[in-house]
Image (spheres, rainbow, N blue to C red):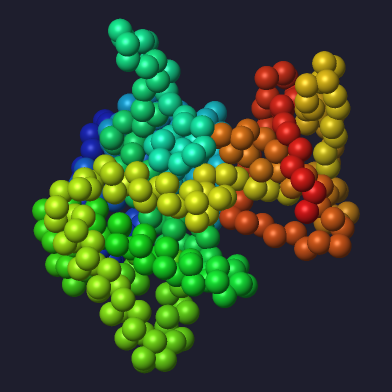
Amino acid sequence: MLTMSRRGCFKSSKHGTSPEQCAPPQGPGIHVYLFWTKTGDTYFTHLEDGEVTAEDLSIRAAQIVGITPVCHALFALYDPSSCCWYSPNHSFNSQNQSSLILHLRMRFYFRNWHGLTEEPTVSRYAHRTGTEPAGAPLLEMSSLEYLFAQAKCDFVNDVVSLDELVDEVQQTCFKNESLGMAVLHLSHRALQNQSTLQDVAKHTSFLRCIPRSFARHIARDNFLTKFRIRRVFSEFVRSFQQHTVGQGHLGAQEVMYKYLSTLERLAPRFGTETFPLFHLEVRSDGDGSGSYLNASRAHDPSQEMLCGQPTHEVMVSGTAGIKWRKISCRRNFLYFGGCHYDQEIAGSNPGHAACHQLPEP
């Protein structure tokens, strides 16, 4: 845990209940969980008197991690207990908070920033030098390490769940891909520790590296099925160490790229936010090129929420922007890991947000 004194000094102490995640602090203050630092995951605790904005806390947390100003705008503070993102100008007062646990998370995610899939590659603008292309990698190493740690946590906590798959072929494919993700997870640790993949696998169970829904399925399997899965995984580890990691064909950065690109394919909603709307007005933008969400009229959200089911579903992503679709009144609304917001959607024009319509379910 990193504790900030009133004079701005940082004192480091860490107490963990498991090698995977440190335990949250029990004392007063605003505690921001950091998925990754150069010394492991930790908490940054704010105890200063007076108000502090979410942006200030994010900047301080980014400085601890080593995230540069170029990338820290991609991150935001998230409250896991209420599934709420805090806008940059939201004010906290540590004196009014007995204990508040927040997470620093990469919120604005762009698919295929790594360039490993067939989708359009996303890069950061840079000045052209000679014949070199003008695009630069979107993330620097500290941001990549942090995103990788966040993605591992999301994957284990069922950003895509085995329970959602009803087709047996899909379930089998998902299980195999999950075991492959576990091998990448352990390979990254082996490369960092300069040890073999087999040694890491002896000390870290693959059950900690796969979705919890898959681990629950394994727990319900009979002894022979469990033995077969462990044997298949052990053979996968041995082969991957012998032919890939041991031969130097894959470095730590390539492992992270592969892990994140595979997660994009397994969990299409990774890096997106989906949430319900109880009222939506759509108007033409005047030139026929699209439509806008009209946020200029005030409505009583509490009254609308009491009137029945959501009428629309909105998905926000860094690559595709804002999309929406109607929800059938006969369809039960599924809230796929989305989050509530404490700020309105903002677009290029005041009171409006540029959007595209999704196919109706």
> Where residue 283 sits in the image (x, y, percent)?
86, 27
Q: Quadrant of residue 178?
A: bottom left
Which residue is situated farthest in the bottom direction here? 223
Q: Residue at x 83, y 39 (%)?
A: 280
Front in this rendered view, residue 341 or 26: 341
Which residue is situated farthest in the top direction here? 130
> Where residue 244 sits in the image (x, y, percent)?
21, 55
Q: Quadrant of residue 64?
A: top left
127 vs 111, left or right, is left
> Where residue 146 sits in the image (x, y, percent)?
34, 43
Can residue 43 be seen?
no
Q: Residue at x 50, y 51 (%)?
A: 265
41 vs 153, left or right, is left
> Where residue 211 sits in the image (x, y, percent)?
44, 66
Front in this rendered view, residue 132 or 220: 132
Front in this rendered view, residue 26 or 163: 163
Q: Residue at x 23, y 61 (%)?
A: 240
Can residue 17 be seen?
yes
In this rendering, the answer to whether 318 lies above or below 38 is: above
Q: Residue at x 36, y 32 (%)?
A: 139
